[in-house]
Amino acid sequence: AQSVTQLGSHVSVSEGALVLLRCNYSSSVPPYLFWYVQYPNQGLQLLLKYTSAATLVKGINGFEAEFKKSETSFHLTKPSAHMSDAAEYFCAVTLYNQGGKLIFGQGTELSVKP
Amino acid sequence: DVKVTQSSRYLVKRTGEKVFLECVQDMDHENMFWYRQDPGLGLRLIYFSYDVKMKEKGDIPEGYSVSREKKERFSLILESASTNQTSMYLCASIFKDRGGSPLHFGNGTRLTVT
């Protein structure tokens, strides 16, 4: 069975600093991987996804993630944090034959200090 | 644009009440899901459905049931609400053959059971 682990339930960065949110997955077959963002009092919005094409995936709002099979990782990065990036971020995994059923990580809350 | 609508944004119910959470999607999606979101636990799958009148248990189905009488509507039922069911509930949908496509989420229903 697949699983996802997000390292760090809270991450705090200064405005303009690098954002790095960590995600490791477990899967016996090639997975599909997703990052979602949730702003306060809102639903989940897709940031980016990996579906076995390019290993470096670019998403919305300047975020990107790199699929590293050897490390079973899919870390999310952004070169320069903005105050509006403060939110909760979720990594999720599924397989091609699971009809979209996602397994989520525990979530990481990102704070951005002025 | 896909719209997944959850009928209530906030609900307050008493212990022992029967509670219905409604979800409607407007894109003719076959697959629909109910997740529960709790701090530090991420999103956990309660039930899902791949067709009308079909349902499958997710990871935490105890205390819940679902109904899918029409393709566009997927209802989550708490037969006898308990305080440990106080949580954020999120509905999602997707076409059945789109394993690499992202789930579309509603904005959530925050349920408080007193």
Image: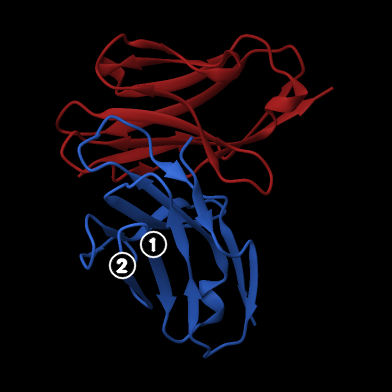
Chain colours: A red, B blue
User: Label 2: chain?
Assistant: B
Which corner quadrant of the image does residue A79 belong to? top right
Q: CA distance from mark 2 to mark 1?
A: 6 Å
In front of the other: A73 or B56: B56
The label on residue B109 is none
Q: Is residue A21 visible?
A: yes
Q: Earlier in the sequence, mark 2 or mark 1?
A: 2
In front of the other: A36 or A75: A36
Horizontal arrangement in the rendering, residue B44 relative to residue A96 (left or right): right
Horizontal arrangement in the rendering, residue B15 relative to residue A104 (left or right): right
Residues at marks 2 and 1 touching, judged by CB atoms closer than 8 Å: yes
Q: Compared to A53, does B114 lie above or below?
A: below
| Residues tagged by mark 2 and mark 1 found on one chain of the structure | yes
- Does dot 1 land on a helix, a strand or a loop? strand
List the residue tagged with mark 2.
Answer: B68
User: Label 1: chain?
Assistant: B
Q: Compared to B89, does B77 lie above or below?
A: below
List the residue tagged with mark 1.
Answer: B73
| Amino acid at dot 2 | Arg
- Residue A27: x %, y % from top left: 21, 34
Q: Residue at x 70, y 13 (%)?
A: A17
| Amino acid at dot 1 | Arg
Residue at the farthest bottom position = B16
- Does dot 2 land on a helix, a strand or a loop? strand
- Residue B46: x %, y % from top left: 36, 62
